[in-house]
Image (cartoon, rainbow, N blue to C red):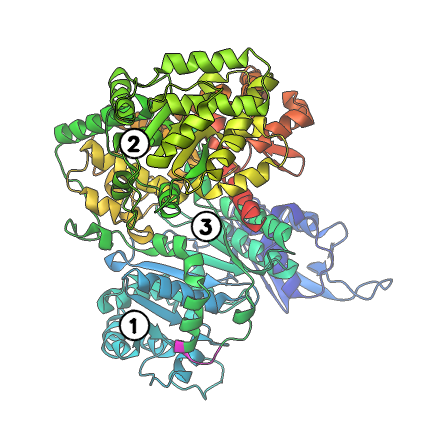
Amino acid sequence: MIMPDEELGTPGHIFTWVDVDAHLAALAAAGRWPEWVLECDAFWDGLEVTVAPDASQVSALSWLSEVFGVGSLFQDEQPLLRLDDVPGRPSTRLLPIAVHRRDVEKPRREPRWRERRIVASLSEPLPRPGAPFAGDVRVAALHSFKGGVGRTLHGVALAEALAQRGGRVLLVDADLEAPGITWMFGAHGRRVDFGYEDFLALLHSSENGRPDDAVRLGAAYLPNQMMGNVIVMPTRRSLYDIAPPRLEPTDLLTPDRSIYYLTESLAELADRLGARTVLIDLRAGSSELAAPILLDPRIQRIFVTTVSSQSLHGTVRTIQQLGRRAPSGADDPASVAVITQFREDGHRELAMSAATRLRDAISGTLERLSPGRDDLITDRDVTLEPIFSVFQDRLLALPESWEAVTDLVRRQHLSETLASLADELLPAPEQVRQDHPSDGGAITIAVQPDELAIRRNHLTEFAQRLVYAETAEDADFLPTESLRNILTSHRTEPPLCVVTGAKGSGKTFTQLQMCFRHTWRRYADDVGVSGVTLDAPLAPVLVSKHLSDSARERIDEIQQGATTDGGPGVATQLALHDLVDGALRSELTNVEWRRVWLTCMARVVGIDATPADVEHRLIEFAAENTRIFLFDGLEDLLQDLLGNEIQRQALRVLLIDCIDWLRSLRGRPLGLIIFVRRDLVQSAIRQNHQQFFARYSDYELKWNHFEALRLALWVTQRSGALPELTADQVAAARNQSLSTMLHPLWGEKMGSPRSREARSDGWFLAALSDFNDQIQARDIVTFLKESAAHSAEDVRSSTRLLTPAAMRKALVQCSLDKIRAITEESPQVGAILQHLQSLPAERKRIPFSPEAVELTTAQLEVLAANGVVFREEDEYWIPEIFRHGLAFKATGRPKILAIANLVRQRNNLD
């Protein structure tokens, strides 16, 4: 293997002509030959150096002396190169040197690890392929530097994942020395009619550089070797034949054929078989058996490695060599790394370190970002994420047959681990299917530019109304897991719970949607939870002061409907605020504060109670009535929670004491749901707040990745921007179909479907998440609003509502809004962010040291707790959702989202 540039000094030892040849080849590959040196050929009996006609022998010998070290050459009747001998003895082992002055024809470069001719052009990559694979077939190859790392097993799991998605797969066992898939298939009892060696032999004997016979015969026999939706091509027909292969892939590299003859022929065969994806299990190590496939840049290279030093180091070197010889072009897939066989409890740091090394190596194989294209960091980094496959005891000893192995893969959920890679390998749908997109089809929009502009405007206007949901008048909403959890846990009795969430997570919107349904059962019906028999009226107590006039009028109507018959009417929001404000100016006990809050509840159902008699009056009311009280907008009343102990006491009593009192009522006729910001709870409950959060964790308003994507689809469909999509289809969306259903919104990738750009859904999630892996509903809606508005300015034709350029622009405004929101939510965090914003531009670089940005350890801990920074070794990183608004630039290789992935892994393992 060729040494990296930094190691190319004078060689340590030159024992034979092989060392001479290897050193000259390494210099050529590194571009370290003078331009007048054309070719060098070392043999057992001499070294031949060919130089340009105008170059001199003296210059050639001087250069050789320089690269092999002082004293390595001497002149007798002809120049000689000293080879190393026993230390302390003058060397008599000499290699004659011949210098020729003539032009040489530039040789044909071939995809081999070891080049046949050592020429100056070794510093150049191999020639680019002329066109994509036939039929737009995707071809992927699994390679490992060492055997026994799980390469074959993950290949089978990936084939199963593709087959489960409805794609037909051609799975090729190309390990000609130690086949694994072949043994699984043979042990299953299936007859093998056609193998990889047959295919190679037919290609070798073909004429005119065409694979016609090999494709025709393969297409005739391989369908007999189909397992489900996977067509298996074993290495050979007989399991008893363990002899070395008669033919190797490099035997196909003849002048009359394309240098990518093998991979192109496999793609043609797959196309004839109706398979859209080819998976190839390669020989481990630096083998010429794998070189003609790995060195085709159109191949999706999948590197499987453990965290062990030898496996990891060899994999990194292999990736680096591929980057030098066959770098990925603009439309080629980036390499993927799969890290296997590490334990969550003992190897976490090793796995994270391995991920960083692999990510950096793969990043080095891609074209460099243009200066100033800081907006593309998100796109590029998403494509480099390694896949983590943790150690599983049951995978140590694999069963014998194909069926048993695939059954184990399913039971151990290995295909789910490779889901993102399977999605990447599925070709774009060839035909529009609008009838059942939830079954995996795609909806495309082929409309005129004017119509596209109208749809974008619809999305902009609808999302604008939803950005601040408390001002929205729409009575429709998207049910989430937390909402379903509240209902399923309280089908027959009123809830007594606290619903926490960050600013912008949807607390006020959720309270409004509950109120608009009037009763608990009607709300359950609209959420889609069956079996809810409790038909209790909903009584809003405190609401946000930011409600629109129409929303406030509807709340007033609902409050009047929740009163007891013949009661004096409900107290206004102003009267309730005055009651609480008066209490905040007094020094009350916990019991007195409980009675203040209970008085607020009593007055909104028409009970003319005072704190002195409220408990008795509520007990009387509860004997014949049931109600569910709703609290929101507490931050409007308690604006100085951090610095005011009375306000902290008031909130603490509402969250704990009031719920305990209501729970003590026989039959629990009264319910209470408190919507409150998570940071306010943490300020009020200084001790055991984690235990408090855990009690209500199922109800917390947080958006997982699936629900975030479904929210984006729901907003788009509700806006009318996708009239082809129905509300029922959105509601029925599942993980596997959701990504495809979003293609009309933002495309499959942040570029063409065949490009190596990030998948649009992955980019969206990574760009809007913080380092706590949190994503807020308001950020999602803001992103859609801004992206649609910027897309409307693009007059070019498109098949997507949101263009990649518009999505990148939108991220800046989302970031600014995010910083403003977290500043309002937590002044302490806001003050630190304001300091970072005020830094001079030359100091706004990530990663950064604490000294560079003048932050203390305590301040950095506050930012880390809020997902704004993450520490890796002695440097700190900022997620995209904050970085753009803070105007920080990335230096070196892009790792921002890579760090986010490590944080997610760490959180999962914790």
In this rendering, is residue 210 above or below 801?
below
Q: Secondary structure at mark 3?
A: loop
Q: Position of residue 768 (x, y in %)?
A: 42, 34
Q: Is residue 610 left or right of residue 71?
A: left
- Residue drawn at x 29%, y 32% is 513
Disc on the earlier residue, 3 or 1:
3
Comparing labels 1 and 2, the label whose residue is closer to the camera:
2
Mark 2 sits on what residue? Answer: 513
Comparing labels 2 and 3, the label whose residue is closer to the camera:
2
Q: Is residue 740 left or right of residue 702?
A: left
The residue type indicated by label 3 comes to Pro
Q: Position of residue 231 (x, y in %)?
A: 31, 72
Q: Is residue 506 visible?
A: no
Question: Is residue 401 magenta-colored?
Answer: yes
Q: Which mark is residue 125?
A: 3
Comparing 846 with 506, the one in front is 506
- Residue drawn at x 63%, y 28% is 860
- Mark 1, Cα crowd under 10 Å, few <14 / some 14-19 / many 20+, is few
The residue type indicated by label 1 comes to Gly
Disc on the earlier residue, 1 or 2:
1
Name the residue at the bottom extreme.
Answer: 240
Mark 1 sits on what residue? Answer: 228
How many badges with numbers are in the image? 3
The residue type indicated by label 2 comes to Gln
Q: Secondary structure at mark 2?
A: helix
Q: Is residue 67 left or right of residue 273?
A: right
Q: Secondary structure at mark 1?
A: loop
